[in-house]
Image: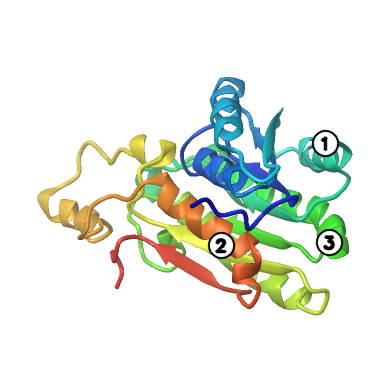
Amino acid sequence: MSLERLSDRVVIVTGAASGIGQATAVRLASEGAKVLASDINQEGLTETLETANEVAEGGGECITHVADISREADAANTVETAVEAWGRLDGIANIAGMLRSGRTHECSLDSWNQILAVNLTGTFLMCREALPHLMESKGAIVNAASTSSSFGHPWMAAYAASKGAIWSFTQTLAVEYCKVPVRANCVAPGSVHSGITSNVSFPDDITKDESKLVRRIMSPTGFGDPQDVASVVALLLSDDGKHITGECIRIDGGTHA
């Protein structure tokens, strides 16, 4: 039996061309949401569009929008596009992100800034532009943190810093807008198959002792699927999550239990 917890709700999903973002856009459409799927990758968005509209239930539908959410104008235009299409905005799932790994003392400033621009600044810009509309609808925000937000992940300094900041930022939003109310939560995936994790590499000169540090961030139950995260995002955006705000839900197969 299908769920239709999000019928007639308008939701933006960033990073929707692949992985967790794509799975989230598809899941929300299947629950009746009107989804604006945003990403910088047009080809991936085409696949998202086709899949989301195939499974859409209860009035759900999907449109796509190409944008670089680290750019102020693009973030504003993304929100405007959703509101112009459907007249309102009820939720946003900020899933877009990037990861580059390497030794911290070899990380260039350009690489550091680019990762923070996409992961952290992009999340801020999308929230800033969405909030006036979410205040009207008493909507919800779900931001993508990571298990690296609260647990040391070697060779991922910029990524971990950005994700830790997203968690702090989300807590601030939850308190600042709790009287509206606009709810704000994080999901913290770990050991989940996605475009990001499939491209992770570690230093070529890693030692045997250092290789043990990789095992400590791997799930004892194996890797999860993007759909495992999408289902939690759907919960948090729906009325089933109406008493959850300021929370960071870890989805990592028990990695850090």
- Measured from the top left, where is residue 223 in percent x and y? 28, 50
Disc 2 or 3, which lies upstream in sequence?
3
What residue type is disc 3 on? Answer: Ser
Residue corresponding to mark 3: 137
Kindly indicate whether the residue at mark 1 contacts the one at mark 2 (C-beta within 8 angstroms). no
- The residue at the point 52 percent across, 50 percent down is 2
**24 lies left or right of 121:** left
Residue corresponding to mark 1: 81
Q: In this view, does 175 lie above or below 89?
A: below
On-image quarter of the C terminus: bottom left
- The residue at the point 46 percent across, 56 percent down is 160
Closer to us: 68 or 22: 22
Q: In this view, does 26 lie above or below 192?
A: above
Disc 2 or 1, which lies upstream in sequence?
1
Judged from the image, the secondary structure of the residue bearing numbered disc 1 is: helix
Kindly indicate whether the residue at mark 3 contacts the one at mark 1 (C-beta within 8 angstroms). no
Residue corresponding to mark 2: 235
- Measured from the top left, where is residue 42 in percent x and y? 62, 22
Closer to us: 39 or 83: 83
Residue 145 visible within the image: no
Judged from the image, the secondary structure of the residue bearing numbered disc 2 is: helix
Residue 152 visible within the image: yes
